[in-house]
Image (cartoon, rainbow, N blue to C red):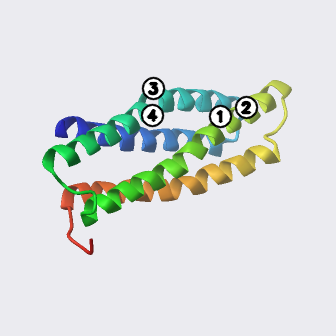
């Protein structure tokens, strides 16, 4: 179970970072057709890899906590769980924003027009929500490895 937990955390981190990288690169190119196609792939990758990894990560984490008898009040675990929910609170809107960016870019590509202001607002939200999510995942990894003591 621990191996599955580690594997799912790695998949969650790697897929999230890869998706963000490729979507950002497409966005920086500014070509609505490229953005729409990349966003389509990003949405599929999130559904196929990220969402299942989130579920497996949480389920195996709870199983390990109960199986090993680690109370949820332990500092590192309590902090990791809190950050896990921070990640989710950022990621859920990001899913919607990615789909919106895809629609807006596809509409611009079909019309042969530049990307609309709504697309750029959407991507600003996407970008800024990514930072607390990414930072939280990094801290969660650190907490899982180091398991620091602290105030309970």
Residue 103 badge? 2
Q: Quadrant of the C terminus?
A: bottom left
Question: Mark 2 or 4 closer to N-term?
Answer: 4
**Residue 29 quadrant:** top right
Q: Which residue is mark 4?
A: 51
Kindly check if marks 1 and 4 are in contact, taking CB atoms under 8 A apart as contact: no
Q: Residue at x 27, y 66 (%)?
A: 75
Q: Nearer the viewer, mark 1 or mark 4?
A: 4
**Residue 72 quadrant:** bottom left
Question: Mark 1 or 3 closer to N-term?
Answer: 3
Residue 99 badge? 1
Secondary-structure class at tag 2: helix
Q: Nearer the viewer, mark 3 or mark 2?
A: 3
Question: Mark 1 or 4 closer to N-term?
Answer: 4
Kindly check if marks 3 and 2 are in contact, taking CB atoms under 8 A apart as contact: no
In the depicted view, which residue is nearer to us: 55 or 123?
55
Q: Residues within 10 Å of mark 1 (few under 14, many from 20)?
A: some
Tell me the distance, in whole angstroms, between the alpha carbons under discs 2 and 1: 6 Å
Horizontal side, residue 29 vs residue 148: left or right: right
Tell me the distance, in whole angstroms, between the alpha carbons under discs 1 and 4: 15 Å
Secondary-structure class at tag 3: helix
Residue 111: percent from left, percent from top: 85, 27
Secondary-structure class at tag 4: helix
In the depicted view, which residue is nearer to us: 79 or 104?
79
Q: Quadrant of the N terminus?
A: top left
Kindly check if marks 1 and 3 are in contact, taking CB atoms under 8 A apart as contact: no
Q: Which residue is mark 3?
A: 48
Farthest left residue?
68
Kindly check if marks 2 and 1 are in contact, taking CB atoms under 8 A apart as contact: yes
Kindly check if marks 3 and 4 are in contact, taking CB atoms under 8 A apart as contact: yes
Horizontal side, residue 87 vs residue 38: left or right: left
Q: Residue at x 76, y 35 (%)?
A: 104
């Amino acid at each position: 179970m621990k191996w599955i937990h580690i594997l799912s955390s790695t998949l969650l981190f790697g897929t999230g970072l890869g998706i963000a990288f490729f979507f950002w690169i497409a966005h920086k190119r500014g070509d609505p057709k490229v953005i729409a196609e990349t966003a389509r792939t990003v949405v599929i990758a999130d559904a196929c890899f990220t969402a299942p990894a989130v579920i497996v990560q949480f389920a195996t984490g709870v199983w390990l906590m109960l199986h090993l008898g680690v109370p949820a009040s332990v500092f590192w675990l309590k902090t990791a769980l809190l950050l896990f929910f921070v990640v989710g609170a950022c990621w859920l809107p990001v899913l919607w924003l990615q789909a919106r960016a895809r629609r807006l870019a596809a509409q611009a590509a079909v019309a042969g027009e530049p990307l609309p202001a709504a697309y750029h607002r959407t991507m600003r939200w996407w970008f800024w929500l990514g930072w607390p999510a990414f930072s939280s995942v990094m801290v969660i990894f650190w907490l899982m490895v180091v398991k620091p003591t602290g105030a309970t």
